[in-house]
Image: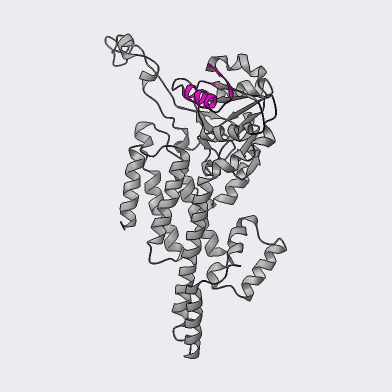
């Protein structure tokens, strides 16, 4: 099997060449890569695991040369790196690495039942109740043997057992993280029937897999109409409207400029997001802020469906986030028709006609009514709590 550095370099190359598209695919591949890296480490003490993940995490985050090319990086890479670091810190501090389940461990479980352990330790506490593995039983026999011989080798054996236990539990937690990412759309879709009712009109924007799964889940027991804003200049709404029509939805495609004219007929706006920021705002396709303003003006609920791996602990003021992605002017103008306007002006180094084509838009939290995630519905003001549950403050800056 290739070494960790070779695997990371290969994934970095894929990110730079944009061979991996979409937040879910990027997040899942990042988690699987870090799982492989940890599995190949011989030393499994917590400081070594943390430093290794941070080192490779910085390389993955730097894979998008956003400073030079004005490209908004895929922030889910950094989110997963921080999630894995939080997992390591939790497993190291939870008491699992103190050895195999004992009377002290049972006392920890009792403390949890009394409410003394935070919700972030639920996963680690459940692992305390597992039956000891074959490796653990062998370690117990070995430790008992060394006790009979005077305990000369007891400390090294305990240290190795702790390191192995930490690595084993971290690997299991990352496996659960991968499963969580792969099933995020299904978890979000299960909440659709609570929000969408019969004969309602839903407005969405552009194209989103999360929104598609959400609407399809509601369609099983609800009959409603969907308006789709086309999402110029990429016009991803055209493909989305076609997909909805193929699924049997009553679909109406509208232009982005018609949003204010049509919003009064809408019962709810349901959209996806590229990233959910720490303040409860979102980054989405360009034009989304206009839709949010229209919904706010007419009192229409603005609902965002987004998985937790899109939750970023950074704020919009962060330099990494503020940079947008500028697309080619060819999305707006045909060079053949406007070539003369784009030539350099006489006695000037600037073009007569400049074209700016941003790809993303920022929607502040005051324009958002509800987030639907794979762990339930939350207000924008609750995002800070989710960040505290999923990330450690020591890992905000890698």
Res 377 quadrant in image: top right
Question: Quarter of the image containing the N terminus?
Answer: bottom left
Horizontal relation, residue 221 to residue 131: left or right: right
Q: Position of residue 198 (x, y in %)?
A: 70, 27
Q: Residue at x 37, y 19 (%)?
A: 329
Q: Nearer the viewer, residue 33 or 249?
A: 249
Would residue 238 be counted in the magenta stretch?
yes
Residue 14, percent from left and from top:
34, 42
Residue 212, magenta (yes or no):
no
In the picture, measured across the screen, residue 3 lies left or right of residue 191, that is: left
Q: Position of residue 185 (x, y in %)?
A: 55, 40
For the point 59% across and 40% down, which residue is it? 188
- Residue 112, image x, y percentages: 68, 63
The correct choice, above or below, for 205 with respect to 398 in the image is above
Residue 145 drawn above or below residue 32: below
**Residue drawn at (57%, 14%), measured in percent from left and top?**
258
Residue 271: tell me if it is visible. Answer: yes
Quadrant assignment, res 331? top left
Instruction: Give above or below for 37 relative to 77.
Output: below
Above or below: residue 130 compared with residue 303: below
The stretch of residues the image draws in magenta is 229-255
Count of picture labels: 0
């Amino acid at each position: 099997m290739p070494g960790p550095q070779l695997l990371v370099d290969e994934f970095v190359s894929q990110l730079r060449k944009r061979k991996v598209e979409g937040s879910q695919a990027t997040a899942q591949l990042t988690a699987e890569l870090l799982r492989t890296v940890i599995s190949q480490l011989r030393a499994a003490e917590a400081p070594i695991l943390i430093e290794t993940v941070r080192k490779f995490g910085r390389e993955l985050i730097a894979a998008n040369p956003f400073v030079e090319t004005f490209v908004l990086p895929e922030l889910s890479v950094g989110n997963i790196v921080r999630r894995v670091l939080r997992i390591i810190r939790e497993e190291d501090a939870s008491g699992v690495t103190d050895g195999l389940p004992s009377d002290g461990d049972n006392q920890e479980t009792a403390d949890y039942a009394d409410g003394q352990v935070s919700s972030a330790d639920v996963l680690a506490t459940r692992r305390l109740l597992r039956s000891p593995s074959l490796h653990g039983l062998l370690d117990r026999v070995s430790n008992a043997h060394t006790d009979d011989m005077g305990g000369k080798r007891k400390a090294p054996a305990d240290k190795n057992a702790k390191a192995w236990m930490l690595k084993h539990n971290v690997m299991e937690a990352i496996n659960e993280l991968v499963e969580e990412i792969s099933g995020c759309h299904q978890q979000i879709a299960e909440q659709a029937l609570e929000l969408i009712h019969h004969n309602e009109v839903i407005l969405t924007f552009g194209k989103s897999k999360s929104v598609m799964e959400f609407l399809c889940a509601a369609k099983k027991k609800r009959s409603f109409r969907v308006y789709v804003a086309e999402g110029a200049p990429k016009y991803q709404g055209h493909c989305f409207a076609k997909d909805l029509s193929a699924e049997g939805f009553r679909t109406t495609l509208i232009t982005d400029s018609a949003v204010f004219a049509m919003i009064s007929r809408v019962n709810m706006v349901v959209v996806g997001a590229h990233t959910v920021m720490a303040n409860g705002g979102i980054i989405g396709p360009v034009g989304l802020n206009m839709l949010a303003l229209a919904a706010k003006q007419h009192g229409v609920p603005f609902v965002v469906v987004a998985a937790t791996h899109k939750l970023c602990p950074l704020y919009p003021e962060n330099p990494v986030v503020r940079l947008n992605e500028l697309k080619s002017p060819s999305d707006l103008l045909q060079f053949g028709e406007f070539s003369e306007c784009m030539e350099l002006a006489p006695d000037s180094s600037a073009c007569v006609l400049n074209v700016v084509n941003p790809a993303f838009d920022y929607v502040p939290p005051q324009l958002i009514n509800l987030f639907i995630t794979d762990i339930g519905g939350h207000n924008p003001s609750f995002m800070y709590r989710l960040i505290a549950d999923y990330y450690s403050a020591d890992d905000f800056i890698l």
